[in-house]
Image (spheres, grey):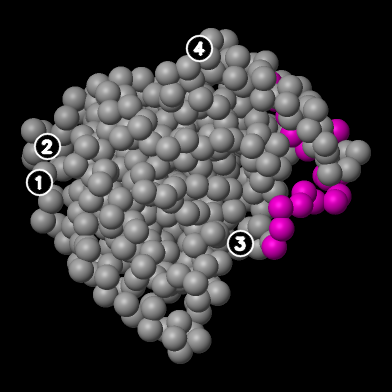
Amino acid sequence: MPEPMTITEAAEFIRKGELTPSALLDQCLARIDRYEERVKAWVYLDRDGAREQAARLTAELKQNDYRGPLHGIPIGIKDIIDVFDMPTACGSKRWANSFARRDATCVERLRQAGAIIVGKTVTTAYASFDPPPTRNPWNLDRTPGGSSSGSAAAVACGMCLGALATQTGGSITRPASYCGVYSLKPTHGRVSVDGVLPLAPSLDHIGVMANCVRDLAIVFQTIAGSDNRDPHCRNAIVHDAFGNNYEMPRDPDMGYEHQWMCVTDDFFPNRCDDAMRAAFDATVRKLVRYEPVNEQVGRVRPVALPAGFAEAPAQQLTVMATEAAAYHEPRYRRHPDDYPPKITSLIEHGLRTSAAEYARCKQAQARLVDDFRTRFRALLVPATPAAAPNKDTTGDPAFNAPWSFVGMPVVSLPFAWTADGMPLAVQLVAKRNQEADLFQTAAWVEAAIGFARRPLPL
C-alpha cells in the first residue's frame, strides 16, 4: 500500500482533476480496513455518509466548482466535538447513543470548505488521562498518548489526511509526537470551542493533526476566526496563516533583541531521557549550520525561561482540575461509575481546591502570559521527555501543559527515530496570536530537519 498523501499533495491532484474525492476517500477507507482492527483509532465511522459527501464533492468539480484546498479531503473529528447526526460519546459508554443535533462551529467550517467528515476518533474518557483502547501504530504495546489518541493514530495510519483534536494540558502535542505526525495547538481563543465538551474552559484549545506544516496551516486557516457562540473567540481575527511559499519573513526585527529562534537550557533538557536529549542536541547543531534565509534569520540563540516556569505544570493542573470539577460535578455525583480512575482523581483534586489556591494559580498564569510577550519570537524545545511509554499510560504532559496554561501557539514536528523505531518530536512555541510567524518558522525547521518517514510496521 503506498504512503498516504499530505493534504497539500492531495489538494493539488484534486485541483488538477488527477484525483477525485471519491477515489481519495476509497484510499482512506482501505487503510481503515487494513489497520483499524489492531489500532482502534475510531469510535464511530460514517462510511455511507462519507461516500455521499465524496460523490457530491466529485460532482461539484465536474461543474468547475472548487471550494479550495480542503475540497474532498477526508478528516477525522475527535469524539468530544459535535458532528451532526453522529454520537458524541466523550469516551463514555453511557453517552454512546447521544447524537449531536448540529455541527460544532469548527466542523461546520470544515464542511463549508469541502472536507469529508469520515467519523469520530477515540478520546480518552472525558478528554482526561485514563488510557484509551487505541494503540500506537509504531508499536502496539505503546501508548498513542492522550487524550486525542484516535486522531493521532488515524493520521499516522493514513486513515484520514487530517484530524481535529483538543488540548487542555498536552492532548494534541503529546499524542501527535508519540505517533509521528505534525500538530498545531493554536493560541487560546483563536478557534471556537462551540459544540465541544469542556474540560477547563480557560485552557481548552481546538487544534489540528496532519502530515506536514503546510497542512496544519490549511486546516487552521479554515477553522479559526471569530464566533459569537464562544465568549473566548469573539474577536479572533485571523490573517493569512501561511501565504503561498515557505519563505521566512524578510524583516525579523520585532523591536527586541532576541533573534528568530531560541533554545533554552532551562526546565526541558534535564527532564529528557538520553535518547531524546541526544537527538535534540544533534538537531540544534544541524539548525545552527543550516543556511539562513538572510544574515539575521535562521540563527539559534539561547534564552532563559521566566522565573516560576517550573511551577507551571502543577499550576495548570490545579486550574484544569478546578474547572473540570465545576463542570462535571453534577454528572459525577449522579454517575460515579462512569468516571474511570484518572478523571475521578482530577475531579476530586478540583473539589479539594480552595478559591484562594485557584486564584493564586490564575495570578501566576497572568504573570507568565505577560512575561512571554517579549521573551522570544519562537522557542524550540523537545515535545515530550521521551518516546511513547507503555500502553497503560498516556504519557507525561509536563512539556506541553505550560503552553496550554499561557495559551501560546505550538507546532510539533517529528524529527528523529529511537533505536527501537519510535518517533520523537520537537515543538515550536510562538507569541500569542502569531500563528503566521509560527508556521513560517516551523516550515524552515521542517526543511532543515528533513525528517525521513518510514513505513508502518503493521
Q: Quadrant of residue 84?
A: bottom left
Q: Which of marks 2 and 1 is nearer the N terminus?
A: 1
Query: Where does residue 156 sit, x and y in percent of width and height?
Result: 40, 42
Vertical placement of residue 227 versus 343, above or below: below
Q: Earlier in the sequence, mark 3 or mark 1?
A: 1
- The residues bearing labels 4 and 2 have C-alpha atoms spaced at a distance of 35 Å
Q: Quadrant of residue 395?
A: top left
Q: What stretch is highlighted in magenta?
A: 244-264
Vertical placement of residue 421 versus 227, above or below: above
Q: Residues within 10 Å of mark 3 (few under 14, many from 20)?
A: some
In terms of secondary structure, where does tag 3 sit? loop
Q: Which of marks 4 and 2 is in front?
A: 4
Q: Of the numbered discs in the image, which one, if any, rests on residue 273?
A: 4
- The residues bearing labels 4 and 1 have C-alpha atoms spaced at a distance of 39 Å
Q: Nearer the viewer, residue 420 or 329?
A: 420
Residue drawn at x 55%, y 48% as measured from the top left: 212
- The residues bearing labels 3 and 4 have C-alpha atoms spaced at a distance of 38 Å
Q: How crowded is mark 1: few (under 14 residues within 10 Å), some or many (20 or more)?
A: few
Residue type pointed to by label 1? Arg
Which residue in the protein does label 1 denote?
Answer: 94
Q: Say if residue 21 shows up in the picture.
A: yes
Question: Mark 2 and 1 residues: CB-CB less than 8 Å, in contact?
Answer: yes
Which residue in the protein does label 3 denote?
Answer: 238
Decide whether residue 202 is among the magenta residues: no
Residue drawn at x 63%, y 58% as measured from the top left: 241
In the shown orientation, is residue 455 left or right of residue 242? left
Q: Say if residue 365 shows up in the picture.
A: no
Residue type pointed to by label 2? Asp
In the shown orientation, is residue 226 left or right of residue 292? left
Which residue in the protein does label 2 denote?
Answer: 338
